[in-house]
Image: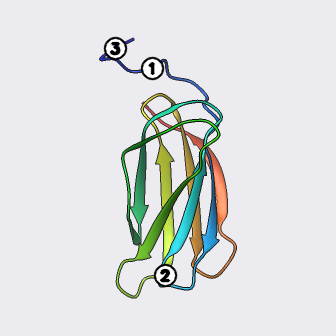
Amino acid sequence: LEFGLLPSGEIGLEARWKETKSQGSLLLITTEQFAQTVVLDVQGGIPNDNYFHLVPGMQKCVEIRGDGDVRDFHVSIGALNTNKKLSIAGRAGSAPALSLQSDIR
């Protein structure tokens, strides 16, 4: 363990969109194992929360608001204790795509 971080590995991060009636979309995030300092890198939007811990069995709802008139979002989700990142892209109001990527370190 380095700097008090948990061992790096697969923690089962999952995310899905939930459309809202406002300008933004809700991103629902869950994990199978403790996720230390979940980080959202958002292109085309602004999250209402970032850099949080997430425990198994809990769901974190993060609202992503469009950056100006932009309604296309691309969100990369990672945590300090995993080398995997989720990547979600989509247009607000349509079904977004979800993929799992290895983080290059």
Q: Tell me residue 80's x, y (percent).
A: 42, 32
Q: Amino acid at mark 1?
A: Leu
Residue at left 34%, top 14%? 2
Q: On the image, which quarter does residue 48 sit in?
A: bottom left
- Ranked by sequence position, the earlier of labels 2 and 1 is 1
Q: Residue furthest left?
A: 3
Q: Position of residue 34 (x, y in %)?
A: 54, 30
Secondary structure beneath dot 2 equals loop
Crowding at dot 2, Cα within 10 Å, few <14 / some 14-19 / many 20+, comes out as some
In the figure, residue 95 lies in which quadrant? Answer: bottom right
Image point (58%, 77%), residue name? 91
At a point 59% along the width and 58% down the height, the residue shown is 28
The answer to which image quadrant residue 20 occupies is bottom right
Residue on which the image places disc 1: 6
Q: Which residue is mark 3?
A: 2
Q: Quadrant of the N terminus?
A: top left
Along the polypeptide, which appears first: circle 2 or circle 3? Answer: 3
Colour mapping used in the image: rainbow
Disc 1 to disc 3: CB gap under 8 Å: no
Q: Could you tell me which secondary element the residue under label 1 belongs to?
A: loop
Residue 38 vertical position relative to residue 10 in the rendered view, above or below: below
Q: Nearer the viewer, mark 2 or mark 1?
A: 1
Measure how far apart labels 1 and 3 are at the Cα level: 8 Å
Residue type at the position of mark 2: Arg
- Who's the residue at 50% across and 70% down the image? 73
Which residue is labeled 2 in the image?
A: 71
Distance between mark 2 and mark 1 Cα atoms: 36 Å
Note whether 80 is above or below 5 in the view shown.
below
Residue 21 in the image, given as x and y percentages of width and height: 56, 85
